[in-house]
Amino acid sequence: MTKEEFFNFVEADNQRILELLQKKNNDYTAGADNALANFEQAERIGIDPVKGILLRVLDKMKRFETFAKHGFLSVENETVLDTADDIEGYMKAIKAYLKNRNYP
């Protein structure tokens, strides 16, 4: 893959991820104005939302480990690329929290 092909892929993939996040955000926040409302549910049990998101990332990383060990995943309607998309979405949420908290 050339650099041009790579950066074209990144641009198209970023747009696809944005559209996916918009759809998932609607489903997971019950239409609330707060885009991070679902992650803030962690506070109800005394967990910082960033830590809650990191826990979800670790779950997804375990799926990657399973795929790396066995070469397949048992859930047929969710691919390893879907798992990568989920992790990317979680990273965007963490970045939003950090930005909102004025981390450098």
Image: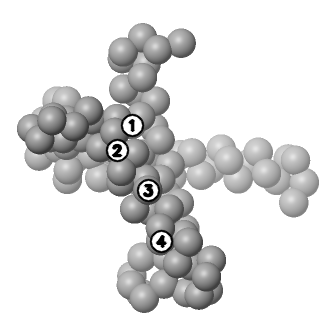
| Relative image position of residue 56 (x, y in whole percent) | 36, 54
Label 2 neighbourhood size at 10 Å, few (<14), some (14-19), many (20+)?
many
Q: Which residue is mark 3?
A: 58
Is residue 21 at least partly visible in the picture? no
Label 2, label 4: how far apart the Cα atoms are = 16 Å
| Relative image position of residue 78 (x, y in whole percent) | 42, 76
In this view, the mark in front (2 or 1): 2
In this view, the mark in front (3 or 1): 3
| Residue located at (53% from left, 46% from top) | 15
Judge by depth and name the residue closer to the eye, 89 or 17: 89
Q: Which residue is mark 1?
A: 93
Q: Which is nearer the N-term, disc 2 or disc 3?
A: 2
Considering only vertical position in the picture, is 62 above or below 77?
A: above
Q: Which residue is mark 4?
A: 63
Label 1 neighbourhood size at 10 Å, few (<14), some (14-19), many (20+)?
some
Q: Which residue is mark 2?
A: 53
Label 4, label 3: how far apart the Cα atoms are = 9 Å
So how many labels did they put on this image?
4
| Residue located at (61% from left, 82% from top) | 69
Label 2, label 1: how far apart the Cα atoms are = 8 Å
Is residue 42 at least partly visible in the picture? yes
| Residue located at (29% from left, 52% from top) | 24
Amino acid type, residue under disc 3 in the picture:
Leu
Q: Which is nearer the N-term, disc 4 or disc 3?
A: 3
Label 2, label 3: how far apart the Cα atoms are = 9 Å
Considering only vertical position in the picture, is 51 above or below 74?
A: above
Question: With 35 as the anchor, is 12 left or right in this view?
Answer: right
Task: Report if the CB atoms under discs 2 and 1 are less than 8 Å apart.
Answer: yes
Which secondary structure, mark 2? helix
In this view, the mark in front (4 or 1): 4
| Relative image position of residue 63 (x, y in whole percent) | 47, 71
Task: Report if the CB atoms under discs 4 and 1 are less than 8 Å apart.
Answer: no
